[in-house]
């Protein structure tokens, strides 16, 4: 698991470094990182963009790199345990997001536990898809990975573009959320990194 953590983290760090140097990076990370230069996305959109790229692309690649070929199946139990860890952190993350975004906090209170069920399902589903993708990669020689990764990246980037640029009526309704959020990026990062 320690190796998976390092490989997984390095996928993000590599994408960020490439983006900052204006070098090619995965398309889904490019969409997510370009959104940081735009004042319109709300905090939740930024979180979803990062999770989309990191779980839906990076996690599968990192798992396959960590345990390619026949060793891959040995990673399954540890991979699954992370789902429970993530599920246990949802309430804390929501509280932190709510402290930065009062409108989202209000929506969370109004929705009761429904949003937690949706979030847990979505993260679990994304991780299942990441495992399936990793399984497909691990079964191939690494020389055949580039095409599969590029294809997955295109699909995930398409979802990222929908998150970053939702339909106009959604964008207008999100303005109500955005004007009430903390605009202090450093503080936002400090609060969320403590989650």
Image (cartoon, rainbow, N blue to C red):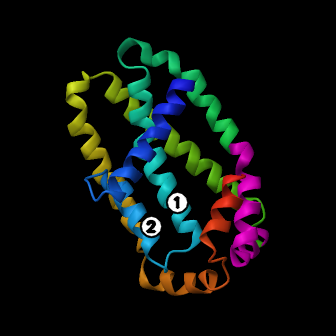
Label 2 SS: helix
Q: Quadrant of residue 133?
A: top left
Q: Quadrant of residue 132?
A: top left
Q: Quadrant of residue 115?
A: bottom right
Label 1 SS: helix
Please say whether residue 1 is visible from this viewpoint: no
Above or below 100: residue 160: above
CA–CA distance between discs 1 and 2? 7 Å
Q: Are marks 1 and 2 in contact (CB under 8 Å)?
A: yes
Above or below 183: residue 140: above
Residue at the (30%, 51%) spot, across then down: 25
Horizontal and vertical percent for residue 60? 42, 36
In which quadrant of the rendered image does the N terminus lie?
Answer: top right
Residue 129 vs residue 178, the one in the foreground? 178
**Where does label 2 land, which residue?**
163
Horizontal and vertical percent for residue 144? 20, 29
What residue span does the magenta drawing correspond to? Answer: 87-109
Residue at the (70%, 78%) spot, across then down: 103
Is 89 on the left-hand or right-hand side of 34? right
Residue at the (43%, 24%) spot, across then down: 66
Please say whether residue 92 is visible from this viewpoint: yes
Above or below 49: residue 174: below
Is 100 on the left-hand or right-hand side of 1? right
Circle 2 residues within 10 Å: few <14, some 14–19, many ≥20 = some
**Where does label 1 land, which residue?**
48
């Amino acid at each position: 698991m320690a190796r998976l953590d390092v490989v997984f983290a390095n996928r993000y760090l590599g994408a960020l470094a490439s983006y900052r140097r204006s070098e090619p990076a995965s398309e889904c990370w490019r969409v997510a990182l370009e959104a940081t230069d735009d004042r319109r996305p709300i905090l939740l959109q930024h979180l979803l963009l990062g999770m989309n790229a990191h779980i839906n692309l990076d996690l599968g690649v990192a798992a396959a790199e960590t345990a390619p070929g026949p060793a891959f199946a040995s990673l399954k139990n540890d991979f699954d345990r992370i789902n429970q860890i993530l599920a246990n952190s949802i309430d804390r993350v929501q509280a932190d997001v709510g402290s930065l975004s009062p409108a989202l906090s209000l929506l969370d209170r109004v929705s009761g536990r429904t949003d937690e069920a949706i979030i847990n399902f979505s993260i679990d589903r994304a991780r299942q898809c990441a495992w399936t993708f990793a399984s497909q990669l691990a079964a191939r020689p690494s020389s055949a990975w580039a095409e599969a990764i590029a294809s997955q990246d295109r699909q995930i980037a398409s979802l990222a573009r929908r998150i970053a640029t939702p339909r106009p009526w959604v964008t207008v309704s999100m303005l109500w959320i955005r004007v009430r959020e903390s605009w202090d990026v450093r503080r936002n990062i400090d609060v969320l990194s403590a989650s």
